[in-house]
Image (tube, rainbow, N blue to C red):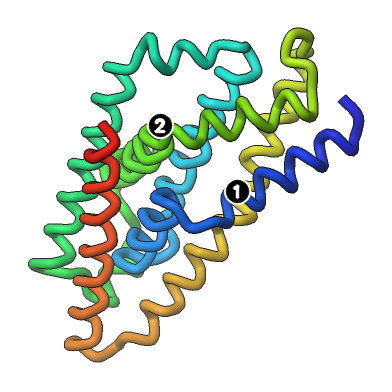
Amino acid sequence: MVLTAYLAYAAALAVAAAIPGPGVAALVARALGTGAQRSIPMLVGLALGDVVYLSLAVGGLAFIANTFAGVFAAIKIAGACYLIYLAYKFWTAGIEIQDVRKSTGKREGVTSFLAGLAVTLGNPKVVIFYMAILPVVMDLSNVSFNAYLLLVAITFAVLFLVMTPYILLASRARSFFKNPIALKRLNRTAASAMAATATWIISRS
């Protein structure tokens, strides 16, 4: 692959990722609810989900998404349930500003990561995007391992560059809400966004 092909892929992915969707909604809600640091595992999960579909597309194995539909559905429902749990937690108890500064536990990071992974795997538009854009920039019947690794690296880099501003803006917005009443409203806004995302995921099952 030539440099222009990689640049075209990166540009197309950046535009697609920047458009608000279920992944952005879940990530922003997570950042509003717990701050920037605790949102990173979810971002990693979202990005890894993209790499899964990228790998399927590169290997010409998009049919696997249908063959193992039950597995993807189970992962998707698990992620939706976790988002509902977070929504309930934020709505009823909320998170105090000082809690946001505390380090997250390993278990919470794993569940946040799995929720991000489930959101991406539960969005069929992702695999459609990769199957549509990849044939334009490369020959899927003859892909070297090095070219594949570079595509994976570009995917992670682009998604982090595009999604991180969403996290930072949401986290910064949260820091302005020092008043307990305002913070409670913000927690419930985050809860509503998470619940809406979970509902969208379940409705696509």
Q: Amino acid at mark 2?
A: Leu
Task: Classify residue 106 as left or right of residue 95.
Answer: right
| Earlier sequence position, callout 2 versus callout 1 | 1
Q: Residue furthest bottom?
A: 179
Residue density around tag 1, few if under 14, some if 14–19, many if 20 or more, within 10 Å: some
Quadrant for residue 185, please give it: bottom left
Q: Nearer the viewer, residue 31 or 102?
A: 31
Marks 2/1: CA distance?
16 Å
Vertical position of residue 157 compared to residue 19: above or below: above
Any mark on residue 121, and which?
Answer: 2
Q: Position of residue 167 (x, y in %)?
A: 48, 63
Please tell me which residue is depicted at 29% across the width and 32% down the height of the picture.
76
One can see residue 185 in this view: yes
Q: Quadrant of the C terminus?
A: top left
> For the image shown, how many numbered marks are present on the structure?
2
Q: Residue at x 71, y 21 (%)?
A: 148
Which residue is disc 1 drawn over?
Answer: 16
Q: Residue at x 60, y 48 (%)?
A: 16
Name the residue rendered at 20%, 54% in the picture: 86
Give x and y (percent) for residue 75: 29, 28
Q: Which x, y percent locates residue 133?
A: 69, 32
Relative to residue 154, is residue 57 depicted above or below? above
Local packing at callout 2 (Cα closer than 10 Å; few below 14, some 14-19, many 20+) is many
Of residues 22 and 99, the one nearer the viewer is: 22
Say if 179 sits above or below 13 in the image.
below
Image-based side of 96 in relation to 172, left or right? left
Instruction: Find residue 94 and report its image quarter.
Output: bottom left
Residue type indicated by callout 1: Ala
Please indicate whether residue 36 sits to the left or right of residue 74 in the image: right
